[in-house]
Image (spheres, helix red, strand yellow):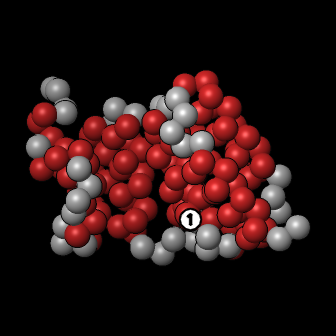
């Protein structure tokens, strides 16, 4: 089996089903998760894994499955050298989980490391960073 082909097959499958909702979407996510898990570990060396991971992160965020969101963030960030990427994606997870203090600290690190570029165009995450008082209730 060609691992790269399988990654693209999984990407195409979940992309085609990404507009599903609720239990139907969960069924498709579970399928991709199980197919990913049985692939040999060389899958982590395939740079195209990041395409699948980004989509899976967003879809698991949509269904509020934070354990699997974290799993796919780890897949995405595997062997990542840039701290700003690590901080941003972990901040995104913490934000979605409602851990706003942790999220802010991680976004702040990403912001400072890139002079703000990491959060440009990031919608709610940029708004949160600029206006944390709207989100963090003391």
Q: Nearer the viewer, residue 43 or 83?
A: 43
Name the residue at 83% across, 71% down.
2
Residue 28, located in which quarter of the rendered image?
top right
- 35 horizontally vs 94: left or right: right
The residue pinned by badge 1 equals 50
Name the residue at 55% across, 63% down.
51
Is residue 69 among what the camera can see?
A: no
Name the residue at 59% across, 58% down.
52
- Residue 130: x, y in percent? 12, 50
Q: In which quarter of the image is the C terminus?
A: top left
Q: Which of 60 and 132 is in front in this view?
A: 60
Name the residue at 23% across, 50% down.
123
Residue placed furthest toward the front: 16
Q: Nearer the viewer, residue 128 or 29?
A: 29
Is residue 49 among what the camera can see?
A: yes
- 111 horizontally vs 66: left or right: left
Numbered label tally: 1
Disc 1 residue crowd, few under 14, some 14–19, many 20+, Cα 10 Å? some
- Residue 132: x, y in percent? 15, 41
């Amino acid at each position: 089996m060609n691992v790269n082909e399988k990654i693209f097959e999984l990407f195409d499958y979940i992309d085609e089903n990404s507009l599903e909702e609720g239990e139907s979407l969960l069924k498709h996510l579970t399928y991709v998760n199980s197919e990913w898990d049985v692939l040999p570990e060389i899958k982590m060396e395939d740079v195209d894994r990041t395409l699948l991971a980004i989509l899976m992160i967003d879809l698991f965020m949509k269904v509020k499955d934070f354990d699997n969101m974290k799993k796919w963030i780890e897949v995405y960030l595997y062997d990542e050298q840039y701290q700003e990427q690590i901080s941003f994606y972990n901040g995104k997870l913490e934000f979605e989980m409602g851990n706003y203090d942790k999220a802010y600290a991680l976004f702040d690190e990403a912001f400072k490391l890139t002079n703000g570029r990491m959060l440009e165009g990031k919608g709610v995450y940029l708004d949160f960073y600029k206006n944390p008082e709207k989100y963090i209730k003391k």
